[in-house]
């Protein structure tokens, strides 16, 4: 099985789906001639021409809305945000139009569209470019929210998202583009709404998505040396959320730590914690722990930036709290 | 003394003057062309009056924005397109839906919140949609629908299907980002869309002269190299002719246009608005320009028999009474979960 990067996996997914369906097109800033701000659309312009790989000027609300209108009448747009930080100026199109038109129209017009791009803090890009908005979008009925952590998940889920009949907010980890994973060649679709166990363990369940899966893998390796076996469950899609797979793991281990890079207040982890306490009350041996970024806009200085975000040591400490080892 | 922040809007050398009532020239037409347009306008007015009545008795809820006084704009413009063409409209869109071919029955039932409503009681007054007639909807966020119209036009260009999209919005939308971005992208990509500003001179309670630095909205087209037009919306045939020019341009060359039609709503912004920001004289002046009276008189002048006109008006009355009865008798809306996510 070939080992490829997360970036290449996304590129393959779009290339294959565009080969498969002439109604699929890509629109966004720098997606064509520049080959993508993060090179995710590398080579697609040469393959598919300017008709299907459309460089947009800086007008997120405008081109996100054009995507919604095109989707209403039968096309299947992929709208790239250079980063999800810029999606906020287009959020009216996503929340008020894409998410609602199927319902407002009494089921007449569904919106098969993918809004994709990098999300979450990168490295020293300051507060306006270092944000995790998954809880904003996961709050909205009518949307699906996907956050793959590996190249394999990225490819399989993006292909599924492009074929979905509904608006999908597809948030890529900005620091994950160079990470690699075994990815099957060709057609392997991963269903939206199915969690994945990234590591099996008996002592405690870590629930994490996107780049926090990698932090948890490192924490689990460290904890294994102390004889603590962590099970890491990656929901992969936040809406719909595969609560059953999550709960099955928590019932097995009796303990749960939820790790997210977003802010703590009304973060998506709070919803996960609610679901787990409701479904697993009789199995829990300790309160559910959450690990989040600090409740501040992201500072620039590298040492402060690291301090704000969940690190391996923070996950290790939370695990030990949940095991009453500290 | 500190200067006031708000100053009256300006005219510029490029401002297109709208003719006053006295300056109007008659546009050539026939009774065969005008009678159906008059019938549509009258049906919309009677439907709006029926809505107001039902609202006052609590049978229609929420926000209700009536188009009374502005009927010639949607009827004239939509008469200039074909069924395959798309229409995108605002929350003041009952008339646009009707003019595109939606029957009064499902519109009225929708406003009553009934299962038989156009969108099953899920949308209400502000969100009418109809796929069979390519009516792409009524939108409640001002200006947010302009990019959607550009998107439908993008799809037409992508597929080469020859369809044109009409997008309606008020002059109040001309200050918001959705309009600016939709306009810019439609111009940049040469999308076959006609952007129609229904300038009823008030964004809710704020008159144009206190909301725009330059009163001519169509001037925005110049910055984008886009064709523009500006005229009054009193004469439904004139609206049809002038919009047809823009539609033809869009269909044959793909070029979008910005067309401003100056009109007037006789009632408040919505049912909760008594319209205290306007003088009685001003409202009376515009009532004298009523597009329905103008068309009715023109029909008579063209030799349309008064007896046939009376029959037409009786027919409209019966149509709307039937729609109200249908709405009254229909079962209540009963489901919403199936329409959140398409399986």
Image: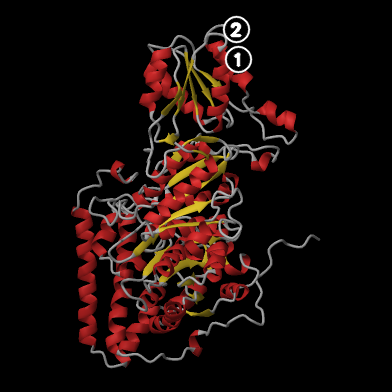
Up/down of A258 relative to B204, above or below: above
Q: Is mark 1 in CB contact (under 8 Å) with mark 2?
A: yes
Q: Residue at x 50, y 89 (%)?
A: B23
Q: Gap in Å between the C-alphas at discs 1 and 2?
A: 8 Å
Q: Is residue A194 left or right of residue B185?
A: left
Q: Residue furthest top?
A: A325
Q: Quadrant of residue A31?
A: bottom right
For label 2, count other residues whose C-alpha is less than 10 Å away and answer few (under 14), some (14-19) or many (20+). Answer: few
- Which mark sits nearer the N-terminus, 1 or 2? 1
x, y percentage for residue B201? 53, 70
x, y percentage for residue A81? 55, 50
Is residue B241 visible to the viewer in this orientation of the structure?
A: yes
Q: Quadrant of the C terminus of chain B?
A: top left
Up/down of B13 relative to B181, above or below: below
In this rendered view, identify the residue nearer to me: A115 or B82.
Answer: A115
x, y percentage for residue B86? 37, 68
Q: Is residue A143 left or right of residue B201?
A: left
Q: Is residue A274 left or right of residue A223?
A: left
Up/down of A173 relative to A288, above or below: below
**Residue wearing tag 2:** A326
Q: Quadrant of residue A118?
A: top right
For disc 2, the chain is A
In this rendered view, identify the residue nearer to me: B199 or A196.
Answer: A196
Q: Residue furthest front?
A: A1
**Residue wearing tag 1:** A317
């Amino acid at each position: 099985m070939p080992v490829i990067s997360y970036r290449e996996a996304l590129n393959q997914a779009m290339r294959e789906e565009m080969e498969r369906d002439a109604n699929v097109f890509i629109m966004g800033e720098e997606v064509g001639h520049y080959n993508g701000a993060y090179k995710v659309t590398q080579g697609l312009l040469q393959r598919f021409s300017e008709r299907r790989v459309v460089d947009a000027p800086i007008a997120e609300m405008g081109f996100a809305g054009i995507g919604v209108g095109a989707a209403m009448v039968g096309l299947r747009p992929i709208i790239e945000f250079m980063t999800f930080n810029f999606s906020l100026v287009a959020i009216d199109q996503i929340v008020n139009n894409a998410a609602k038109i199927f319902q407002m129209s009494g089921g007449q017009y569904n919106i098969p569209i993918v809004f994709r791009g990098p999300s979450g803090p990168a490295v020293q890009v300051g507060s306006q470019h270092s944000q995790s908005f998954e809880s904003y979008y996961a709050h909205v009925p009518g949307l699906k929210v996907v956050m793959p952590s590996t190249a394999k998940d990225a490819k399989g889920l993006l292909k599924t998202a492009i074929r979905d009949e509904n608006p999908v907010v597809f948030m890529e980890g900005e620091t994950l583009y160079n990470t690699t994973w075994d990815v099957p060649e060709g057609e392997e679709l991963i269903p939206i709404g199915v969690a994945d166990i990234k590591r099996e363990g008996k002592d405690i369940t870590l629930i994490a998505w996107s780049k926090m899966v990698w932090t948890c893998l490192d924490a689990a390796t460290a904890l294994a040396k102390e004889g603590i076996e962590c099970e890491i469950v990656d929901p992969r899609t936040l809406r719909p959320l595969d609560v059953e797979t999550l709960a099955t793991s928590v019932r097995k281990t009796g303990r749960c730590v939820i790790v997210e890079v977003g802010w703590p207040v009304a973060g998506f982890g709070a919803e996960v914690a609610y679901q787990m306490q409701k479904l697993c009350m009789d199995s829990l041996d300790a309160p559910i722990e959450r690990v989040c970024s600090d409740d501040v806009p992201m500072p620039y200085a590298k040492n402060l930036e690291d301090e704000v975000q969940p690190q391996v040591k923070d996950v290790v400490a939370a695990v030990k709290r949940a095991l009453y080892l500290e | 003394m500190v200067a006031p922040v708000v100053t009256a809007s300006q005219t510029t050398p490029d401002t297109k003057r709208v003719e006053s009532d006295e300056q109007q020239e008659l546009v050539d037409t026939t009774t065969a062309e005008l009678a159906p347009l008059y019938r549509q306008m009258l049906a919309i007015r009677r439907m709006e009056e029926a809505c107001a009545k039902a609202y006052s008795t609590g049978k229609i809820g929420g926000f209700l924005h009536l188009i009374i006084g502005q009927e010639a704009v949607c009827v004239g413009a939509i008469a200039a397109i074909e069924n395959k063409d798309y229409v995108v409209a605002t929350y003041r869109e009952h008339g646009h839906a009707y003019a595109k071919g939606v029957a009064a029955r499902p519109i009225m039932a929708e406003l009553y919140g009934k299962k038989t409503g156009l969108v099953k009681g899920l949308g209400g007054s502000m969100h009418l949609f109809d796929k069979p007639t390519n009516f792409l909807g009524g939108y409640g966020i001002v200006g947010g629908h302009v990019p959607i119209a550009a998107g439908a036009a993008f799809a037409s260009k992508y597929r080469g299907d020859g369809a044109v999209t009409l997008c309606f919005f008020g002059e109040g939308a001309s200050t918001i980002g959705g309009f600016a971005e939709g306009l810019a992208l439609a111009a940049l990509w040469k999308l076959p869309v006609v952007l129609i500003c229904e300038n009823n001179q008030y964004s809710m309670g704020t008159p144009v002269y206190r909301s725009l630095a330059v009163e001519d909205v169509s001037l925005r087209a110049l910055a984008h190299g886009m064709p523009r037009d500006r005229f009054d919306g009193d004469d439904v045939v004139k609206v049809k002719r002038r919009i047809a020019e823009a539609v033809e341009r869009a269909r044959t060359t793909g070029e979008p246009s910005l067309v401003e039609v100056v009109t007037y709503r006789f009632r408040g912004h919505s049912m909760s608005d008594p319209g205290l920001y306007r003088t009685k004289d001003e409202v009376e002046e515009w009532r004298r320009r009523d597009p329905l009276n103008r068309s009715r008189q023109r029909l008579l002048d063209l030799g349309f028999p008064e007896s046939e006109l009376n029959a037409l008006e009786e027919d409209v009355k019966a149509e709307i009474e039937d729609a109200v009865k249908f709405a009254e008798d229909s079962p209540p809306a009963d489901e919403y979960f199936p329409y959140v996510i398409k399986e």
